[in-house]
């Protein structure tokens, strides 16, 4: 996993008012909650006193109280009360639990997994505004998040994995695709075709962006969008759990139906469709070895895999930068 990045790690609705949430993300056991101002706390789920899970405790006046001896911590992880020492006693500095900056934005919970002094902006799509409505489904995968992301940049698998859904039509010949890196984002334009036995795949440079309205849009480290049309999108946030597990937050976004009630129903149907397609991918991707991807993992790649190569190269660059 790449250090010093904002990661979408939960759906906002998973952190309920007045409740602690203990989950594994980024290979670490973490506790999340909302304080009285609505700010999000994200601490290591381990009390600095004698190692109990803080997520088994309570929220008292916006701080987390350990269930064992009642020590309390604020959202920065600083110890603010040791009841046994008395309410007026100062809390020594070593009573501190590691914490990550956390925010609630775009209906997702983000943590800055790192130690930068000045925090960068949260990554988000410039083409996905609040005029869209959406539904979310949380889908657990037994796969490293890099493999789940690569699957969403893979245009070669469509006629095989999705032969009866989005890959119908036996378009096995892969032109391009064209994959471009812009800042920390990758965009992919594709054109798959039925193989007539005479046509050779076009080079990536021969793909005409303007004639392929559908494109893929990924922003490092972990959000992706399929731009299906101006008014219809699929978005996925790939929350890293550990080296072998990911939770994919799948979202169906649309802005062609705005009528309350009908809108939610359409979004729900869209969400069901997303899950059906994602599960066609999941059963295959979960079998990939090794679990995390990388540039030198002994795979043999083809022209059609070029978005995956680009993803791996920039990922490695970010990993080295840390
Ligand atoms: S272990 Fe948490 S207060 Fe003692
Ligand atoms: Fe797929």
Image: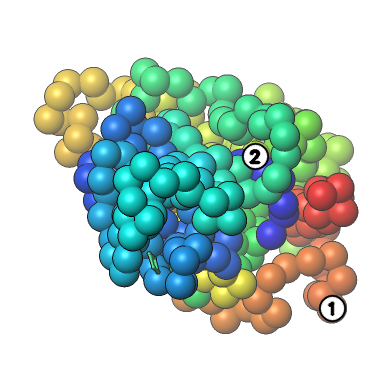
In the figure, 187 relative to 81: above or below? above
Element marked by disc 2: strand
The quarter of the image holding the N terminus is bottom right
How many numbered discs? 2
In the drawing, does residue 229 fall left or right of residue 196? left
Camera-side residue of 73 and 29: 73
Q: Residue at x 72, y 54 (%)?
A: 2
Q: Residue 286 appears at what percent x and percent y?
A: 54, 76
Camera-side residue of 119 and 292: 119
Q: Which mark is residue 219?
A: 2
Q: CA distance from mark 2 to mark 1?
A: 26 Å
Q: Residue 249 appears at what percent x and percent y?
A: 42, 51
Q: Residue 63 appears at what percent x and percent y?
A: 34, 44
Q: Residue 137 appears at what percent x and percent y?
A: 33, 52
Mark 1, other Cα within 10 Å: few <14 / some 14–19 / many ≥20:
few
What residue would you read off at disc 1?
Answer: 298
Q: Which mark is residue 199?
A: none
Mark yes or no: residue 320 visible: yes
Instruction: Answer with the quarter of the image where residue 320 lies.
Output: bottom right
Camera-side residue of 80 and 223: 80
In the figure, 220 relative to 105: above or below? below
Q: Residue at x 26, y 45 (%)?
A: 60
Q: Residue at x 68, y 25 (%)?
A: 210
Between circles 2 and 1, the one closer to the viewer is 2
Would you say the beta carbon of the disc 1 residue lies within 8 angstroms of ligand 2? Answer: no
Mark 2, other Cα within 10 Å: few <14 / some 14–19 / many ≥20:
some
Element marked by disc 1: loop
């Amino acid at each position: 996993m790449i250090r010093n990045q904002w990661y979408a790690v939960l759906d906002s609705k998973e952190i309920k008012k007045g409740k602690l949430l203990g989950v594994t993300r980024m290979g670490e056991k973490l506790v999340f909650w909302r304080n009285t101002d609505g700010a999000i706390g994200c601490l290591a789920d381990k009390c600095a006193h004698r190692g109990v899970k803080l997520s088994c405790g309570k929220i008292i006046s916006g701080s987390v109280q350990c269930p064992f001896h009642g020590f309390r911590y604020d959202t920065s992880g600083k110890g603010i009360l040791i009841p046994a020492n008395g309410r007026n006693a100062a809390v020594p500095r070593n009573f501190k639990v590691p914490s990550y900056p956390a925010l609630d934005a775009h209906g997702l919970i983000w943590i800055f997994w790192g130690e930068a002094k000045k925090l960068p902006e949260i990554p988000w799509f410039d083409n996905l505004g609040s005029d869209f409505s959406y539904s979310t489904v949380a889908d657990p995968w037994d796969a490293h998040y890099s493999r789940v992301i690569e699957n969403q940049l893979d245009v070669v698998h469509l006629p095989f994995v999705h032969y009866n859904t989005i890959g119908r039509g036996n378009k096995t010949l892969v032109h391009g695709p064209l994959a471009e890196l812009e800042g920390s984002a990758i965009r992919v334009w594709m054109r798959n075709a039925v193989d007539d036995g005479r046509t050779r795949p076009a080079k990536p440079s021969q793909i005409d962006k303007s004639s392929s309205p559908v494109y893929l849009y990924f922003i490092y480290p972990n959000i992706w969008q399929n731009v299906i049309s101006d008014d219809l999108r699929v978005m996925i946030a790939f929350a890293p759990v550990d080296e072998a597990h990911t939770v994919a937050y799948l979202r169906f976004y649309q802005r062609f139906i705005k009528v309350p009630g009908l809108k939610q129903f359409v979004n729900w149907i869209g969400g069901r469709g997303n899950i059906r397609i994602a599960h066609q991918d999941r059963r295959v991707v979960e079998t990939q070895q090794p679990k995390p991807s990388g540039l030198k993992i002994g795979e043999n790649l083809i022209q059609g895999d070029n978005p995956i190569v680009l993803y791996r190269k920039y990922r490695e660059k970010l990993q080295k930068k840390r």
